[in-house]
Amino acid sequence: MEPGEHETEKPTPDLFEAFKEIRDAGKSGFSAFSEAGKSMRTLVAADVSLARSALGRTLALLGVAVSVGASAVLLLMGAMVAWLVQDRGVSLTMAMLSLGLIALGIAGLAAWIGTRYFEHTRMKATRRQLARLGIGELAERAPDPSKDAQGIDITQP
């Protein structure tokens, strides 16, 4: 050592103390993880309870809406049949048949649109992400996350 330079020497930590610090850090990390898990479980339970309650009320109100709506459609179709027969001179059979075919067409269109929306219930994006993690029935066909589309290894950051 040169004159004028003074080196402050730090004491080396004891191996037992280092293990003790690592153990304490692990305990605090596990404790935080456990608390986060409990909070998440409480949140999910409350959310499911709220959704269950909302589902029951929604189904009850949808039942009322469907029954009142069906009654209204039947009354309107009866009025249209009476109008076609009295004012337009159409026979009763033809008036009922034409309105029935229109209603059947609207019902078919609604069913077709409903089946298109039903595809969203398959949760395709979630299933793809789970497959990338190796979970689910699509896991065997999922691409290797450590390679790109051409099969070249990707270096993880």
Image (spheres, rainbow, N blue to C red):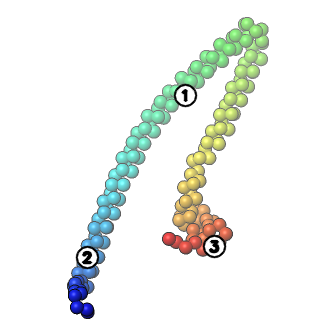
The image shows residue 117 at horizontal and vertical percentages of 61, 42
Separation of residues labelled 2 and 3 (CA atoms): 41 Å
Give the number of the disc on residue 21. 2
Q: CA distance from mark 3 to mark 1?
A: 57 Å
Which residue matches tag 1?
A: 66
The disc, 1 or 2, on the residue closer to the chain's N-terminal end is: 2
Q: Position of residue 3 (x, y in %)?
A: 22, 91
Looking at this rendering, what residue extends furthest in the bottom direction?
A: 1
Q: CA distance from mark 1 to mark 2?
A: 66 Å
Q: Residue at x 63, y 17 (%)?
A: 76
Q: Quadrant of residue 50?
A: top left
Residue type beneath disc 2: Glu
Point out the tag, 3 or 1, that comes first from the N-terminus.
Answer: 1
Task: Report if residue 127 is visible in the image.
Answer: yes
Helix, strand or loop at disc 1? helix
Q: Residue at x 28, y 67 (%)?
A: 28
In this rendering, position of residue 75 left or right of residue 21 = right
Which residue is label 3 attached to?
152
Where is 21 relative to 32, above or below? Answer: below
Q: Residue at x 28, y 71 (%)?
A: 25
Closer to the observer: label 1 or label 2?
A: 2
Q: Position of residue 39 (x, y in %)?
A: 33, 54
Cβ atoms under marks 2 and 3 closer than 8 Å: no
Q: Disc 3 marks which amino acid?
A: Ile
Nearest to the observer: residue 74 or residue 41: 41
